[in-house]
Amino acid sequence: MSKFIVGLDVGSSQIKAAIAEQKNQNEFVLKDLKRFPSMGMRRGMIDNFSDAAQSIGRALQEINEDYPRSIRNLILSVGSEKVNIQTSKGVVAVSRADDEIYQDDIKRVTQSSQAINISPNRIILHPLTQEFIVDGEEGIRDPLGMTGKRLEANSLIIDDFAPAVNNLTKCIEDLGGGVLDVIFSPLASAEATLTKNQKELGVVLIDIGYGKTSIAIYEEQKLLHAAVVPIGSGHISNDLAIGLKIPVDVAEKIKLSFGSASAKKALKKDSIDLNKIDERAQGNASKKFIAQIIEARLTEIFEYVNEEMKKVDRENQLPAGAVLLGGGSKLPGLIDLAKEKLGFSVQLANPNLNFLQPDSAEISIEAEQIDFIPVIGLLLYNQLQYSPQSRIPGQAGSWLRQVLKYFIP
């Protein structure tokens, strides 16, 4: 019997949803893509519970009306600015007398590498096994069937501020939703846009959202580093509102209609009559001044990206360059600015639906929109994570175990 699964991303300005019908274990049909206004969220966290509940409630109600019982199967995007990435190592002795490595050895060393102590207000989102080491030989992806006496595993642990995750899931569940899993948003976005070749060579994924920018660095098919920067395209609107002395919603309109990331390409003599945009705004504004404000804030974002790349010694050293997505990536001139500030090739994300089959031509066209990459990625990542072929013992279900640990001492 088929069922509906919903990828849900509750952002600072919009709630986005991707609804898929799972007809059997290997057949998924992308039925719909939806977006709704969002309130009560700031940089990946609820800052006003009643406002968040109101906007999330409206979204869930519409989704459930169109696809009954679908909201009981939600895959939720998370990732606050308080997210933390750390490495951990585990070591075990191979248990067989003939030194052959079996699945139980892999399970033991995986669990050992992920058995870390975190503070009570943190929650583990993803324990990712990066590599295995057999008798000192590094870089092994699957040691099953090999021989050796000593088996090691290196893991990357992604944890977040527990109240940020738990308040969002509580809000959704209070409204009748059921959260099957939570996924760190850059992992989902990477699944829907990065190629195996990009991940192998080395690439940074930069998702410029409204209230935050998410960063994920991959190399040799592994997540090397990730971070969430508390600056997004919404800060550009705030800057424009201050600089032009206009309301923020008017500044957002100007950004979308006349904004550019390149001040040097904008002409000072080209101006905009602000009153024609909105009667609350007065006077004229040069397009060059607008571009200068936008470029300054985007430059700050790319400086943060460079700082994150420095942490893993990859500044200017990623052969596959950068891939941009998010609403903020649509600004004209952004690619050239990013190339200048990052020092390597930059391209816009190209959505990859993988095994998701669009239900109609309209859905196929919608799925090409860069805005929907993160929610489509939620569906892709969740299915790959829990498929029998890809599951690593000890990883699946870690989020649920952490939630239970948080509420049940």
Image (cartoon, rainbow, N blue to C red):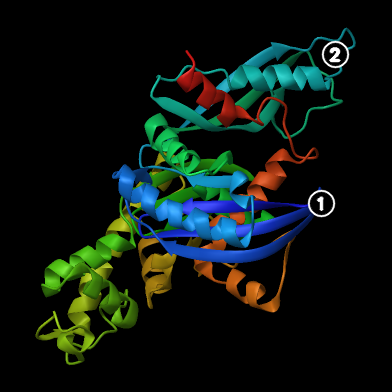
State which quadrant residue 206 falls in.
Answer: bottom left
Asked whether, in this view, residue 192 is left or right of residue 140, the answer is left
Q: Earlier in the sequence, mark 2 or mark 1?
A: 1
**Secondary element at tag 1:** loop
Asked whether, in this view, residue 248 is left or right of residue 46, the answer is left
Residue 72 placement (x, y as % from top left): 61, 44
Residue drawn at (41%, 30%), measured in percent from left and top? 162
- Residue under label 1, please give it: 26
In the picture shown, does residue 191 fall above or below 336? above
- Image mark count: 2
Disc 2 or disc 1, which is closer to the eye? 1
Marker disc for residue 99: 2
**Secondary element at tag 2:** loop
Residue drawn at (39%, 37%), measured in percent from left and top? 164
Residue 327 placement (x, y as % from top left): 42, 66
Residue 271 placement (x, y as % from top left): 18, 90
State which quadrant residue 30 falls in.
Answer: bottom right
Residue 269 placement (x, y as % from top left): 17, 92
In the picture shown, does residue 181 fall above or below 290? above
- Determine crowd level at label 1: few under 14, some 14-19, many 20+ residues with C-alpha closer than 10 A: few
Asked whether, in this view, residue 63 is left or right of residue 52, the answer is right
Tag 1: amino acid = Asn
In the picture shown, does residue 358 fall above or below 143? below
**Farthest residue, direction bottom:** 269
- Determine crowd level at label 2: few under 14, some 14-19, many 20+ residues with C-alpha closer than 10 A: some
Tag 2: amino acid = Asp
Residue drawn at (58%, 46%), measured in percent from left and top? 75
Residue drawn at (47%, 28%), measured in percent from left and top? 123
Asked whether, in this view, residue 359 is left or right of residue 292, the answer is right
Residue 369 in sight in this render: yes
**Farthest residue, direction right:** 98
